[in-house]
Amino acid sequence: MKYSEQIIQFEKYSPMKYLDHKLTSWGRMLYDIENKDRYTSNFAVIYKNENIDEIIKEVEEYYDSRNIVPKIFSRCGSMELDILKPYFVNRGYAIREFDMEFMVLDEESIKNKIDDKYEIKIISNVLEGKECDLAVEQDNGETYGVKLLSKQLASGNDMFFVYDEFKNPVSMALAEKYNDVVYISDVYTTPSSRRKGYGIAVVNSIIQHYDNSLIYLYTDNPEAASIYRKLGFSGERISSWWAIKGSLPEWCVE
């Protein structure tokens, strides 16, 4: 399975109105002014093999001026690590390589709908109350993640929640749409409610809501991947990497 051109275009050019970003001739640099320590929203991607050394210098100037450690991550369609690694080593970058599963929903499988017996809500504004609490729980009590989620919602994306019999939100996922592509992220179920069908329900609700879209996600969790396959996703193991100026931070080696 290969990345479709639609998905590559999504990851290259999706508006990301919730972030400051700079498009260049070679790629993209992302910056979150309110969450400078949030690695998922402060990184660059290199798509073209131009003058690599000059590109890395440009990345460093961009992030150094914002008091952020320069980071260059792989995304679908970006340059291969084998080409970039010598430049990273020469400029003092630490590299973490890891495998993930890239999963795309099979359009034919959408016909096999799963009946949800749980209450579902779609939230399209700032997270508050118990929904906010669940999002904070996902980040072990930290608030930077929920701040980013709220900004993503304010820019036009949707958050899906599943509730238990006591009307408490127990599972959630973010759906980010650009043209006809939907990217699912931040899938989380509170530990006490796992293996009860809530995770399946929240992802299935996104599938049914965007039934005419190309839907994809990433996971490094084999158990989660098995759930997604039940919903009709096909997966392929892919190599991914992060290159970070200096040494690897704690979050990167866990």
Image: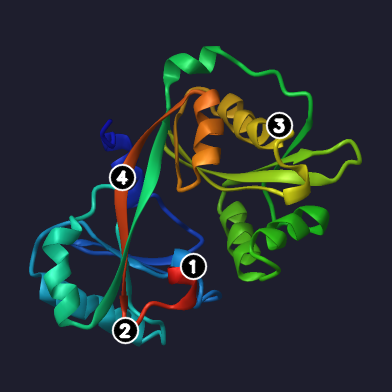
| Residue at 77 percent of width and 60 percent of height | 133
Q: Quick one: label 4 or label 1, which is nearer the N terminus?
A: 4
Question: What amino acid type is highlighted by mark number 4?
Answer: Ile
Q: CA distance from mark 3 to mark 1?
A: 28 Å
Give the residue type at disc 3: Gly
Closer to the eye: label 1 or 2: 1
Q: CA distance from mark 2 to mark 4?
A: 25 Å
Q: Residue 111, percent across and down?
A: 53, 12
Residue position for label 4: 238
Estimate the spatial distance between the alpha carbons at disc 4 and disc 1, rounded to whole Å: 19 Å
Residue with the mark numbered 1: 254
Q: Is residue 216 visible?
A: yes
Point out the frontmost of discs 3 and 1. 1
Q: CA distance from mark 1 to mark 2?
A: 17 Å
Q: Which residue is mark 2?
A: 246
Is 240 drawn above or below residue 60 in the view shown?
above
Could you say which is closer to the camera, residue 73 or residue 94?
94
Q: Position of residue 126 (x, y in %)?
A: 70, 57
- Res 89 → quadrant: bottom left
Crowdedness of circle 1 by 10 Å Cα count: few (<14), some, many (20+)? few
Mark earlier in primary sequence (1, 2): 2
Residue 136 x, y percent position in the rendering: 70, 63
Asked if the residues shown at circle 2 and circle 3 are in contact, with their CB atoms under 8 angstroms apart, the answer is no
